[in-house]
């Protein structure tokens, strides 16, 4: 994460209003700040069939579920861009709601390289100096989670996302792109038909995700950013973990982290001056 959005706590009203967009046949609702780390959560839906998925369960599940119900949508999946706690803390709330509604087909999906982080919920982003304390990373993560009001309850079993296996939300199709760097199992979800990409904490408006935490890899981050630049067209709407929506073209034009000089520094492991 890189943002410092106003604090919010799970289960309260959001610090920013619910927002909604339509991109082709895809409808997207989102809360820009669902928790104390300013993490966004998205409701991605096929209005024609009523099928919907949560992209990153950052918090405020009751509000998102209520909005889905108003529109006649069923939340059938939670799709996680990565396993950091600020992106997964509301997963149990969505799972309980699905169980109460008798939804036997409800799934949670995360890349295998972040699955342990998800299951043990120790993936709170920590600066490297904190990780030298004997308690870290799990002990310090637990303390900071408590400080930020984040739940750390047992997580539902998750399916493993694999690149090459598309995800279907009703008639909508998402391509899974493995883009490690901010975390080993970070992914993006790309809907080519409707021009939408969810990039989590890899690419954000004007910035990129930090590579200063444990399990980050700046070389991988450089490669992942190049991959997004190569794969995603300029007109694609980009929805990230911590900033306002943007487009790939806008980031290509104005995001200093996407210049060839900075990307080369990341890929060579010499990005000290540029790290988030």
Image: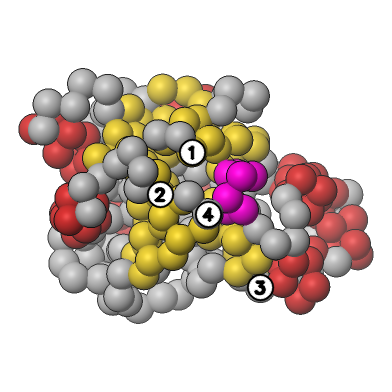
Q: Is residue 195 left or right of residue 167?
A: right
Residue 5 image-quadrant placement: bottom left
Please give left or right for residue 269 compared with residue 145 in the image: right
Task: Identify the residue position indicated by label 4 in the image.
Answer: 24
Badge 3 vs badge 2, beta-carbon distance below 8 Å? no
- Residue that mark 1 sits on: 172
Residue designated by label 3: 206
From the image, tell me which residue sits under label 2. 44
Q: CA distance from mark 1 to mark 2?
A: 9 Å
Magenta residues, as a range? 190-196
Up/down of 25 relative to 37, above or below: above
The part of the image, by quadrant, that contains residue 259 is bottom right
Disc on the earlier residue, 3 or 2: 2
N-terminal label among 1 and 2: 2
In this figure, what is the number of numbered marks?
Answer: 4
Q: Residue at the spot x=53%, y=54% of the render? A: 24
């Amino acid at each position: 994460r890189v943002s410092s959005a106003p604090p919010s706590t799970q289960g309260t009203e959001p610090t920013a209003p619910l927002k909604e967009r339509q991109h082709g046949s895809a409808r997207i609702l989102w809360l820009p700040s669902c928790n104390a780390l300013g993490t966004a959560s998205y409701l991605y839906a096929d209005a024609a069939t009523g099928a919907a998925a949560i992209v990153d369960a950052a918090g405020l599940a009751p509000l998102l579920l209520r909005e889905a119900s108003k529109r006649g949508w069923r939340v059938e999946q939670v799709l996680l861009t990565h396993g950091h706690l600020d992106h997964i803390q509301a997963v149990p709330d969505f799972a309980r709601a699905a169980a109460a509604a008798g939804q036997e087909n409800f799934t949670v999906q995360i890349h295998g390289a972040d699955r342990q982080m998800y299951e043990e919920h120790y993936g709170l982003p920590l600066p490297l100096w904190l990780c030298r304390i004997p308690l870290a990373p799990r002990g310090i993560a637990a303390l900071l989670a408590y400080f930020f009001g984040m739940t750390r309850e047992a997580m539902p079993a998750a399916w493993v996302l694999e690149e090459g296996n598309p995800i279907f939300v009703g008639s909508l199709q998402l391509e899974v792109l493995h883009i490690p760097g901010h975390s080993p199992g970070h992914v993006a979800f790309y809907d080519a038909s409707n021009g939408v990409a969810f990039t989590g904490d890899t690419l954000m408006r004007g910035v990129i995700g930090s590579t200063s935490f444990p399990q980050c890899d700046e070389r991988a981050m450089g490669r992942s950013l190049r991959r997004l630049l190569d794969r995603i067209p300029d007109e694609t709407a980009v929805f990230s973990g911590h900033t306002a929506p943007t487009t790939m073209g806008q980031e290509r034009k104005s995001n200093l982290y996407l210049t060839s000089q900075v990307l080369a520094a990341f890929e060579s492991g010499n990005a000290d001056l540029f790290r988030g």
